[in-house]
Image: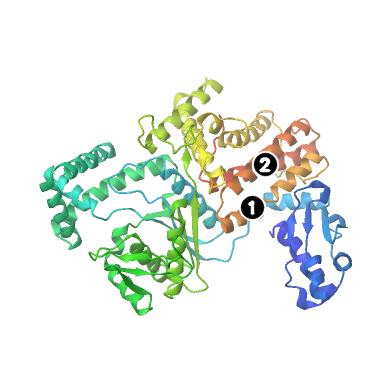
Amino acid sequence: MTDLSSTIEARFRDALAKAFGDEHRATDPLVRLSTDERFGDYQANVAMSLAKTLGAKPRDVAASIVAALDAADLFERVEIAGPGFINLTLTNDALGRRVEAMHEDERLGVEPAPRERIVVDYSGPNVAKEMHVGHLRSTCIGDAIARVLRFLGHDVIGQNHLGDWGTQFGMLIEYLMESGGAVSREIGDLNAFYQEAKRRFDGDPEFAERARLRVVALQRGDAETLELWRTLVDASKRYFDTIYERLDIDRSLLEYRGESAYNDDLDDVIRGLDEAGLLRESEGALVVYPQGFKGRDGEPLPMIVRKRDAGYLYATTDLAAARYRLNVLGATRVIYVTDARQSQHFAMLFQTLREAGWAGPNIRLDHVPFGTILGPDRKPFKTRSGDVVRLGEVIDEAEERAYAIVAEKNPSMPEEEKRRVAHVVGVGALKYADLASERIRDYVFDWNRMLSLDGNTAPYLQNAYVRIRSIFRKADADGIAYEGFGRVKIVEEAERALALKLLQLPAVVRGVAESLEPHRLCNYLYELASAYHRFYERCPVLSADDETRRSRLRLCDVTARTLKTGLELLGIATVEQM
């Protein structure tokens, strides 16, 4: 099934070729969904740009396009407005046929994109440290992006770039050795373990010296030291997995590959930069000066790749990771989901990859920056004591608050079911509040808003899905037959508005894959649910005559599937009852 926007664009390309010759078939017709119903359903803006090429008046060009446009089966009205806009109003029959095709398609009209191998780098917690609320954004945004790209048919590889290497591991391993070489499987104990090790390091010079020597042993591959390091890493991964499971993160899309995986490649990165003529020495350190970056003093801004003591930095590891993703994994697009404070780092990294010849012109490199989660005081979200908020505790509270809502709304529901629904609603609310915010902006963490059954929230969308499914349960209970449904007949304005919103799904999904902004899908789902509620209020379903009932039940069914699919792309589940 070709989606509606693509169909309209194809008609315009044919019209351009017919009116002005085949050389103009490739002209971008700039067909866009109309944001104002006064302008019809779609608006094409091609006449003004083409008029410059042809040396003609824009309205005359628009008139020639309209005269050549194959419109009889698709548009009720085609009108020229302003300096040369072409406004398009679809026929109700065309809308109905398109909704029927969408309903019959298991992909709801979303056609697969040309397949690419895409690596998405997200989450990236640190070993031996508990995940906190700051990890929520990278994890949820990255998971949603990976899901959308996979749905479009891409070969998606998620990379969890763990902080599993560095000087702090000398301190941790030395303390672990003193503790008998065993570490609890519980991350709470491991977190306390980290804090105890840090206190020893700061307060005991002899311990600190042994820790520094332990770093050297780790870097040289000492067997005993490596075994203790793996103990810490494995314990941390077990904990991370519990958090990902509770957040409903798709682990099939996210594989662990930490900083340590690139240790053997770092010397080669330095050699490669040198061979490319990019390496410079600055105060004993080795640096690269990517083009286009200057400091406050106007001097070229360096990216340090090897310290004065011959130690490597994050930039070196990131370069090695990028080469692995491009050369070994064969990615044609690499996406990094990190907070906005790292924007300059990634801009310099990408420029270095280009200048070194490691990322050619056909390789796409994207940084997906995001803002900070704020507390009610509009400062970074922390506990009253000033500590970072543990992510596990945030999930606990989300589920408990959702449980209270579910228990009040449906007290007769079995306890086990209440807990299951509370998990879906609570975690969904937590993730959706993060995803629905324009990612580059900070947002205020507000339990009441995110768990509200009204407004642009996950519970509102989940409840919309539940309401639609309840119609079918009632139809089944009343013995109302709807197998095969029926032709979709658009008569009422609310039916038309719902149908138009449904048919926007393919363009929205493609838009998210391009912009890497999940809030666009959130906004679409909210608008769809709102359109459905207006339809439900104004268009009786089960009490309508048989033909109308079957048509409206079909509209209900495709709406439910679209809501469910859209939420799944965001990593949010649905329930049949709330």
Task: Locate the N terminus by quadrant.
Answer: bottom right
N-terminal label among 1 and 2: 1
> Which residue is under mark 1?
508
Task: Point out the residue furthest to the front here.
Answer: 297
Asked whether, in this view, residue 379 is left or right of residue 13, the answer is left
Tell me where residue 483 sits by quadrant: top right
Task: State the residue in front, 521 or 306.
Answer: 306
Q: Which mark is residue 527?
A: 2
Q: Residue at x 69, y 60 (%)?
A: 2
Q: Residue at x 25, y 63 (%)?
A: 311
In 3D space, how far apart are the residues under numbered discs 1 and 2 (Cα atoms)?
12 Å
> Do residues under tags 1 and 2 come within 8 Å of each other at their CB atoms?
no
Task: Locate the C terminus by quadrant.
Answer: top right
Q: Say what secondary structure mark 1 lies in.
A: helix
Asked whether, in this view, residue 524 is left or right of residue 63, the answer is left
Q: Amino acid at mark 2?
A: Glu
Q: Say what secondary structure mark 2 lies in.
A: helix
Residue 330 seen in the figure: no
Q: Amino acid at mark 1?
A: Val
Task: State the residue in front, 192 or 463.
Answer: 192
Q: Residues within 10 Å of mark 2 (few under 14, many from 20)?
A: some
Residue 268 position within the rendered picture, expressed as x and y whole percent measured from the top left: 30, 73
